[in-house]
Image: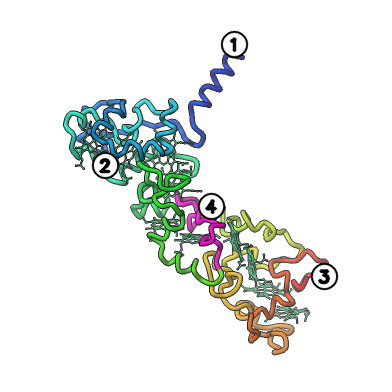
Amino acid sequence: MKKFLGKIFGMAILLAIPAGVALAKDVDWTKLNPAFQGATYVKDSSVCFGCHEDYKQPYSQTAHAKSFQFGKAPASGDCESCHGPRSKHVENPDRSLALKPEQLTLACMQCHEGSNRMSWNSSLHASSGVACTSCHTVMSKKSDKALLSTARQDDLCYKCHTNVRSSMNKSSHHPVREGKVNCTGCHNPHGSVTPGMLKGGSVNETCFGCHQEKRGPFVWQHPPVLENCQICHDAHGSNNRKLLTSKDAFLCLSCHTYGGHVNSQRYNRVSTPTGEGCVNCHMAIHGSNSPSGAKLTR
Ligand code: HEC
Ligand code: HEC
Ligand code: HEC
Ligand code: HEC
Ligand code: HEC
Ligand code: HEC
Ligand code: HEC
Ligand code: HEC
Ligand code: HEC
Ligand code: HEC
């Protein structure tokens, strides 16, 4: 019986903690803004809506409003979990308790530290002064998923990364524009341990997430493929076919300058309109499992 009750109790705890969200940690509000000194929690959002009615309807559509409504609100209540204890504000409403974006980030991290944001503090975004609210709008719902500030995820990133937009507009590109892949298919905007804030443990591991057939191992490996896909591909986009960093033959000849037929006009076919010369014969360019595939021709 005792065991059974324990089980029910355990389940109740599980239900009370939403997936992916850690238990709320306390924030030292006074440290963020000394004006919080002596303030207590009002714990009643209807008091807030008395003066901030404009926010009532838009906020009610958000994941936070919905989640907190079902008893998941922290001890600090709904609004005040992000805005801090507001008793003084209710008595004397002004902007003296306002927080800067980087301080609001600490408020968010009460509940969202860990999981995908494990590397936030060491990320280039954090160290460049990008805040949670640079990408997320939490007072209203603007995107289908993840409370983003724009309806489309790529539009959000392009606000600051205009160079990536121009790469993605090249003739060969990952289909982000077409909505088949997102920036977050390869990146974790909250930071990662991999340079470039990549999702995988390396460039190649990131690519294998979707192009598993390139992983191998192959009987006949092509060394640059093992080393880094980016030697031959630009992940965002290129004006050469198949995201190649240069036209096929030039690409190959940047390493294969000597040997066998490489310098013979008949084989090089640099001048074919599509420039596919070398891979017409060396089709297994990423590696071969054929017993006679040593030259990557099958
Ligand atoms: C999940 C955290 C969070 C919760 C919960 C939350 N807010 Fe906000 N609120 C913010 C952030 C962040 C901003 C800053 C505006 C922005 O960049 O989106 C903001 C902005 C505001 C503003 C305007 C601030 C300004 O500078 O003019 C008001 C007013 C406000 N919130 C009231 C409320 C009320 C009332 C509630 C509860 C019903 C609430 N908030 C719940 C995070 C939150
Ligand atoms: C008596 C009216 C009143 C009540 C009640 C009230 N506010 Fe305000 N609030 C204001 C006014 C006025 C401002 C200043 C607006 C401005 O100048 O932009 C303000 C500003 C804010 C801001 C932006 C500046 C800041 O201090 O961060 C937030 C956030 C906010 N209120 C949240 C809340 C929350 C949460 C509650 C409920 C606990 C609440 N307010 C209750 C009137 C009120
Ligand atoms: C008191 C805890 C708490 C605080 C503080 C908090 N959140 Fe949340 N957040 C939650 C909970 C609970 C959910 C709902 C999780 C779920 O349903 O899986 C959530 C969900 C989210 C989501 C996902 C929404 C979706 O549609 O999937 C985003 C994005 C988010 N929060 C961002 C923020 C940001 C930005 C801040 C600071 C401005 C913040 N949160 C502050 C608890 C919190
Ligand atoms: C550079 C933009 C950017 C910044 C800065 C950012 N986020 Fe996000 N966040 C996103 C995007 C994009 C997604 C959607 C990811 C997806 O769809 O896979 C997301 C998803 C989320 C989610 C829901 C899914 C998950 O990862 O758990 C939460 C919660 C969240 N962010 C919280 C935060 C918090 C807290 C901060 C500040 C510490 C923050 N974000 C900063 C872009 C950003
Ligand atoms: C508010 C501006 C802003 C937004 C929005 C933004 N970024 Fe950034 N991002 C930066 C800054 C600043 C840097 C630092 C380096 C630089 O200046 O390019 C950076 C760097 C990066 C880097 C390079 C990291 C490295 O280690 O080299 C990646 C990848 C990145 N952002 C991805 C994204 C993605 C994906 C999104 C959309 C989900 C996004 N960013 C949205 C400002 C932004
Ligand atoms: C197919 C995977 C993939 C996709 C999709 C992708 N990236 Fe990247 N991105 C990479 C790789 C790989 C790098 C290079 C990382 C390194 O080696 O440092 C990179 C580098 C970056 C950098 C830093 C260097 C630079 O070019 O400025 C930024 C910023 C960036 N990406 C933003 C974005 C944005 C924004 C999107 C969505 C529009 C996006 N990426 C989509 C794989 C991808
Ligand atoms: C989130 C999934 C995803 C990841 C991760 C990913 N790709 Fe892709 N990749 C795609 C999709 C989808 C296509 C388009 C396939 C199609 O249209 O049939 C594509 C197409 C390609 C193409 C062919 C482009 C063309 O013009 O036909 C190349 C080359 C490529 N990816 C290389 C890479 C490299 C290199 C990486 C790692 C940096 C990578 N991909 C990571 C999803 C991904
Ligand atoms: C030595 C240069 C080179 C390297 C390194 C390389 N590729 Fe390729 N890749 C090519 C060439 C050339 C093509 C075009 C092949 C063709 O048209 O038959 C191609 C085509 C592709 C395609 C699209 C056609 C297909 O075969 O599916 C994908 C996807 C791809 N590469 C992924 C990758 C991934 C993932 C890596 C890293 C593991 C990688 N490539 C490393 C040269 C390279
Ligand atoms: C970054 C340098 C680099 C690039 C670019 C490159 N390769 Fe290679 N390739 C190598 C290396 C290193 C080897 C292994 C050489 C060895 O074992 O002697 C190799 C091996 C080969 C082999 C097998 C040769 C043998 O002697 O067994 C063929 C065939 C080949 N590459 C064709 C190509 C083609 C075609 C391209 C262009 C699509 C290309 N390579 C691009 C570095 C490169
Ligand atoms: C008409 C088909 C064909 C074309 C086109 C072709 N190759 Fe080859 N290649 C072969 C065959 C077959 C072999 C193996 C027989 C041999 O050693 O000559 C080979 C062998 C090689 C080798 C290994 C040489 C050695 O000494 O063992 C390299 C490197 C190579 N090719 C690179 C290239 C490059 C780079 C291109 C484009 C500039 C290219 N090939 C175009 C058919 C072709």
Q: State the residue at coordinates (61%, 64%).
A: 227
Placement of the N terminus among the 4 image quadrants = top right
Q: Is residue 245 magenta?
A: no
- Residue 99: assigned label: 2
Q: Mark 1: give few (<14), some (14-19) or many (20+) Cα within 10 Å.
A: few
- Residue 130: assigned label: none
Q: Earlier in the sequence, mark 1 or mark 2?
A: 1
Q: State the residue at coordinates (52%, 65%).
A: 236
Q: CA distance from mark 2 to mark 4?
A: 31 Å
Placement of the C terminus among the 4 image quadrants = bottom right
Q: Earlier in the sequence, mark 4 or mark 1?
A: 1
Residue depth check, mark 3 versus mark 4: number of the one nearer the observer: 4
Q: Earlier in the sequence, mark 2 or mark 4?
A: 2
The residue nearer to you, when weighing 102 against 176, is 176
Query: To which residue does mark 3 refer?
Result: 292
Q: Is residue 178 magenta?
A: yes
Query: To which residue does mark 1 refer?
Result: 2
Tag 1's secondary structure?
Answer: helix
Q: Amino acid under label 1?
A: Lys
Tag 2's secondary structure?
Answer: loop
Q: Position of residue 105 (x, y in %)?
A: 35, 43
Q: Position of residue 49 (x, y in %)?
A: 28, 32
Image position of 241 with respect to 141: above or below? below
Q: Position of residue 51 (x, y in %)?
A: 23, 34
Image position of 62 with respect to 208: above or below? above
Query: To which residue does mark 4 refer?
Result: 199
Is there CB contact under 8 Å for labels 2 and 4?
no
Q: Amino acid under label 2?
A: Leu
Is there CB contact under 8 Å for labels 4 and 1?
no
Q: Position of residue 230 (x, y in %)?
A: 57, 66
User: What range of the chain is rendered magenta?
Assistant: 173-197
Q: Earlier in the sequence, mark 3 or mark 2?
A: 2
